Image: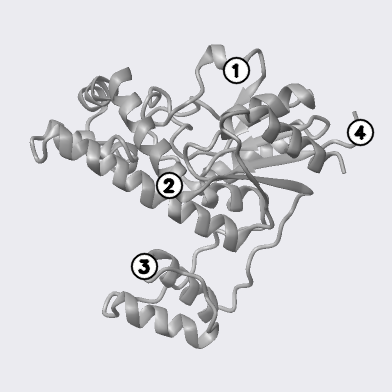
Amino acid sequence: MGEVMIICVVGPTGVGKTKLSILLAHKYHGIVVNADACQIYQELNIGTAKIKEEEKEGIEHFLFDYQSPTVDYSVSDYQKDLRGILDKYHDRNIILVGGSGMYITAGLYDYNFSPLDIQDYSNYSNEELLQMCQKYDPNIKIHVNNRRRLENYLNRIDKNIPEPKLLYDVKFIGLSTSRDVLYQRINDRVDEMIQEGLVKEVEDLYHKYGNVPILKRAIGYKEIIAYLEHKITLDEAIMLIKKNSRHYAKRQYTWFNNKMDIKWFMVNFDNFNDTFKEVVEYLNK
């Protein structure tokens, strides 16, 4: 079987990460570990496109359906839990799969959650924050609308905190496709979620748990809640889910390209096995 590997499968929503993770787990007799911030939660199934039990094909899966929606599970919680699995199963091939770049970075890199004396940038516009960042790095690749990353960058620079370093020997696999194909797949996936009963899923969760933090921030849930609260129509909610999913996909690409050394593969959706073979050839080099 060769040396034990940690394979991290990343990419935007809707490109086939789950499918690839199952194929790789069979090929390398591995386990699959979740790296999606929403699939951590129990009962958030349709809106997160969570893998179904029959789709697991007998492969051991970890950190799926792991927490109640009432728990405000943090990135630092994930860091601790992922590292516990990596330590416990150090003799197994591990396929880490998901699109939450912050979770992956926190788990695999020496990401520090020490409390900082955070500066207050509330009086600055996004454009001003970007200009301040550019004084340190003229080629910085943070979008002007990503205020959180702009502020985080400035706080790191002000405290001379280095960029985190990779702690594990990881092979990063990225799945990609053209923007038009990706956006169409996202739109189609949202339509499928509605047909599968997303509105009922969100309604049940909302009645059971109230507007808990995960429901307020998860794409597909917050928009349906706005519909249930009669703030928007169902058609408007569906359009918003599609729009927010597309924007999230763009942010995912930005994060992965800026933070990780990834080998990207263009997905052949007509014959996914061709993509799988390309990935295996790369891993076996």
Q: Residues within 10 Å of mark 3 (few under 14, many from 20)?
A: some
Distance of mark 4 from mark 2, alpha carbons? 39 Å
Distance of mark 2 from mark 3, alpha carbons? 27 Å
Q: Earlier in the sequence, mark 1 or mark 4?
A: 4
Distance of mark 3 from mark 4, alpha carbons? 44 Å
Residue 130 x/y as whole percent? 40, 78
Distance of mark 1 from mark 3, alpha carbons? 38 Å
Q: Nearer the viewer, mark 2 or mark 3?
A: 2
Distance of mark 1 from mark 4, alpha carbons? 24 Å
What is the quadrant of the N terminus in the image? Answer: top right
Depicted 230 relative to depicted 143: above or below: above
Q: Is residue 121 visible?
A: no
Q: Nearer the viewer, mark 2 or mark 1?
A: 2
Residues at marks 4 and 2 touching, judged by CB atoms closer than 8 Å: no
Residue 69 x/y as whole percent? 36, 30
The mark found on residue 180 in the picture is 2
Q: Earlier in the sequence, mark 2 or mark 3?
A: 3
Q: Residues within 10 Å of mark 1 (few under 14, many from 20)?
A: some
Q: Earlier in the sequence, mark 2 or mark 1?
A: 1
Q: Which residue is mark 1?
A: 56
Tell me: 184 left or right of 281. left
What is the quadrant of residue 117 in the picture?
bottom left
Give the secondary structure at mark 1: helix
The mark found on residue 236 in the picture is none
Tell me: 34 left or right of 135. right
The mark found on residue 147 in the picture is 3
Q: Which amino acid type corresponds to the residue marked 4 in the rendered image?
A: Gly
Q: Earlier in the sequence, mark 3 or mark 4?
A: 4
Q: Nearer the viewer, mark 1 or mark 3?
A: 1
Q: Residue furthest front?
A: 270
Query: How is this picture coloured?
Result: one colour
